[in-house]
Amino acid sequence: MGNQLKKIRESKGMTHDDAAAAMAISRGQYIKLERGERRLNEDYILRASRAFGVPVQLVISDDDEWSGDDELPSAPIGANFLPFAGTTQAGVFVDVELHANHEPQAVAISPDPRYRRARQYVWQVLGDSMNKAGIHDGMFAVGVDYVDFVAHYRPIETGDIVVVERMRFGGQERERTIKRYWEEPTGVALLPESTNPHHKPIMIPKDGIVEGEEIRIIAYVTGSYSLFGKAIFDLDEGQKIHL
């Protein structure tokens, strides 16, 4: 896998120290990445995309046509990219600010054409509570904005997979998790689907308030993806697909 780290860094007028600090790694680590002496894994790619403000695909490009003198494209939200909305836990709720320092602006995943009338986002999934549903630790989950989905398509129904957000301390902190939505007579159960028996359902009463904290659905999840946009599971259809 090639990379354009040197060209990108120089076009930004950044030193090795600047680039390393922006990626939150050591100078030595950065130099090895730039020289190809250290593997540019998924974490480093995402850090570089965020640090330089460029698309993931440019970071890993082998294309020699870009000289480094041309204007750098910003990380776009367009035909081949979706905005990155942070992390969500496949397990318990996770603080949305916990990994914010290394989040990219966009991810190289195309919007789902079935939901053109709705805003779509990408979350990186942490944990294994949804691995039986095809959502594994480290994957990206694509979701349709809840308000848009309900307005243009249909209500959330039992069996849907959703991203849920909990507001704490009067809205000063937010936490997210991803679960299977299941309606119960007294409210909603957020169900794990995991090979790990330690994961338990989260029970939400009808008013959405648990111990004084508001819990709300923020997205309907349509699929799970690897880093570079290859669809692993289409959750709408419940089957593996390959793009």
Image (tube, rainbow, N blue to C red):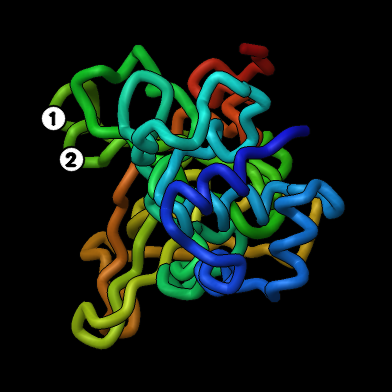
Contact? badges 1 and 2 (CB < 8 Å)? yes
Q: Using the image as rendered, state which of residue 187 and residue 43 is in the foreground.
A: 43
In this rendering, the answer to whether 13 lies above or below 25 is above
At 50% across and 31% down in the image, what residue appears? 108
Q: Name the residue nearer the viewer: 182 or 132.
A: 132
Q: Which mark is residue 68?
A: none
What is the quadrant of residue 72 in the picture?
A: top left
Image coordinates for residue 116, horizontal then vertical, percent: 25, 17
Question: 218 left or right of 37?
Answer: left
Q: Residue at x 55, y 19 (%)?
A: 65
In the image, farthest residue toward the left: 151
Query: In the orientation shown, which residue stands out farthest toward the right?
Result: 37
Q: Which residue is mark 1?
A: 151
Quarter of the figure that contains the N terminus: top right
Q: Residue 230 location in percent, x, y?
A: 63, 23
Residue type, label 1: Ala
Residue underneath mark 2: 147
- Residue 75 is situated, as x and y percent measured from the top left of the image, at 38, 40
Disc 1 secondary structure class:
helix
Eyeballing the image, is 28 above or below 222? below
Q: Residues within 10 Å of mark 2 (few under 14, many from 20)?
A: some
Q: Amino acid at mark 2?
A: Val
Residue at 43 percent across and 35 percent down: it is 69
